[in-house]
Amino acid sequence: MENEGSLNIYRYISIVVKYRWLVLIMFVILIISGMFVVTKQKDMYAAHSKILVNYQMGGVSSDISRFFMKGTIAYLVKTYSLTIVSNGVLQTTKDQLHLPYSVGYLRNHVFVTTEEGTNLINISATLADKELVSKFLNTLIENYIELQKNFLTQDSNRARIYIKEQLNIIEKDLGDLQTQIKEFKEKNGVVDVAAETQKLVETFSQLRYEKLSAINEKKSVNSSLSKVNKTINKLKSGGQKNLISSIEKSPEYNSYIALQEEYEKASLYYSPDSNYMKLLDEKLKQLKEKIYSSASKAGVAGYSIAALFAQKSGLEKRLISLNLEIKKTNNMLGSLDNEFRGIPEKEREYSNLMRKLTVNEKLYSMLLEQEKELALQQVSTGSTIRVVDKAVPAGRPVTTSKVSYALFVFIFSLVVAIGFAFLIEYLDVTVKPSDNIEKIFKVDVLGKIPEITQSDKKLTKWQIIFGKRGKSGIRTFKDNLLTQIDERSTIHESYKELRTLLNYSKLLKEKEFGKSILITSSETKEGKSITAANLSIILAKNKKKVVLIDADMRKPAQHRIFALENSTGLTNYFDGTIGLDKVEDIIKPGINPYHYLITCGPHSHHSSEYLDSDDVIKLNDKLGKMGFEYILFDTPPVNALTDAVVLSNKIDGVIFVIRANQISRHRVQLALEGLRKNEDTHILGAVLNGIPLRGGYGYYYYYYGQTYYYSYYSEDKENEKEK
């Protein structure tokens, strides 16, 4: 027995078959395009290298240099991993090696990754030339290292120029002070100052030196902070505005800024080993980790920006410390000034000169030391990058074989082509046999009628799915009647099912005679007239006296379906030509003694007025008294004319015909809403008509019904042969 899962497979196959030409054309286009690309595909070779980012610049050992470099190592690793493929470095490498590639192509073929928890950066490159790829990668790294050296050299040169300017100024001041001291001694006969005064001068000189050192460091910190802020502003304008704003506005970052200020203020009164300072230090560490954790969720960019903010907060923290230190030193210098006022005037003047001389000598020594450090940096490697592994010539190609690419193209083309068929099916808004009619339109389904074809042999399930059909030619109205169709067909069974449901309808059970039913649809060519005709036939075959009335006065069809003359009919009754007492004159016999018809008669443009009159009720009552159990009305489509709507409130029930795969759901919904506006209208249900016999829903119904009846029919034939 077939299960529901297998039915779904058959339905999916039927969708592909339905759009088979479209699937085939699209598949061919994709496969040709893909194979063309595959034939042009070149083997790619890879080279790999590894570099190390140092904690400090070569040759620099001052506290301030170590402080900055140690605080920004994570930022440097991430920044270098992003900037190593900058346009300038790639363009320089391209020009040096005369590469036949664009800068954009080279950037897309260089891959940079970092190893978490280390200062290592892995760099890989892929090119079509296995000899060139390693040379390209090594040259790229060399150019980047040279670029970093140039940056450091430029910074060092600027620093050395500044230091030389300061040395020249201090050297001149030292000469002037030595001359002033000599002249003062000669003029005033001063040989030396008292020990207490000397001690005071030394203390003052040391404080003054510390203050000037702090001021110089403050300038350096402000310069670095300015660079960091400029970098953050560039990132904001470069698409990282939201990420930066989220960090700046985060409670963790704001708490970190406030806490580090508290930490620096507390450091003036508490020792670093005190419990209070340790507590503050631990809180700062926890907040910093939270900032990193939150930002790292955004990937490399987030981690890099978090490191940048860590550098910024570190600089701001140092700036707070320096400001406090300068303020503290100023207070101490102010106290010493008061002590100096108690010294005799000449001794005080001499002490001031000695104090200035001592301070300048210390500053001069400090600047000389820094100049030596910068000179040492310039003669050393001067880069924060070290090459750990150089790229070596590539071996085997890293790209997938052309056979694998071709297989991928084949599968990809097939999937896309089939997927396109399902997309079209999904976008198709027509009513399909597989739709849940009850749920979509809030109406019961009374029957599902397969499309009518001439068939003289049994079709297998797969023949139906793959488009095999029974013989069909040009069919007339008469050809579609049940009287012309094999009684063992599923068409007959479908109408029998419809008849059964009508017999048990609650709305119709109450009346023994005169059960009036209106048959309509939303649009033309949905098969409502044939449905009405076949329904009347199947009811009559069950010995139910039926009269079929053609109430479509604009485009009547029943007289053509049953090959009857149409000179007189329903319009003659409505215009008074034939009275109610002579209605028998317009009733025509049908296929058997239980089957009768009232054709339309002469066309009329007053159909709405006729059908909205009480004459309809009188006609129904008369026909009921004449013994007609069922009175069927074939009316125009709801969306075309108002005839069905005005007649529906005078009829016991409405059967709504829907043509599968032809009418849109919107048009059906619009027609049903029009009928439901009349509170006295009772919709018995819908009949889904024209279910295709080429797969999808309906093939199941058709196939098993056909199998059963053909089996029965075959047994009959075998029995006849034996006789």
Image (spheres, helix red, strand yellow):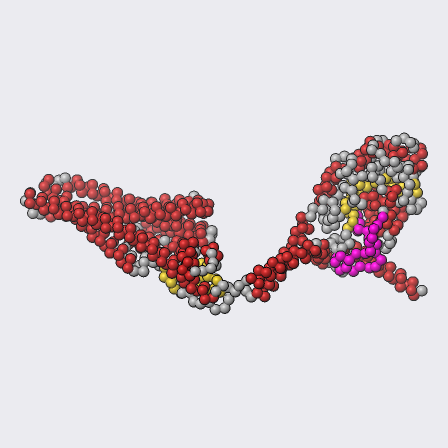
Residue 259 at x, y = what percent?
A: 36, 46
Does residue 474 belong to the magenta stretch? yes
Provide the major secondary structure of the magenta segment: loop
Residue 258 makes an appearance in the image: yes
How many circles with numbers are drawn on the protein? 0
Left or right: where 208 falls relative to 552: left
Residue 537 at x, y = what percent?
A: 88, 46
Q: Residue at x 88, y 51 (%)?
A: 484
Q: Residue at x 94, y 34 (%)?
A: 582
Residue farthest along the bottom direction in this orientation: 395
Query: What segment carries the magenta color?
Result: 447-476
Left or right: where 413 falls relative to 84: right
Q: Residue at x 83, y 32 (%)?
A: 606
Does residue 640 belong to the magenta stretch? no
- Which of 661/208 is in front? 661
- Which of 310/420 is in front? 420
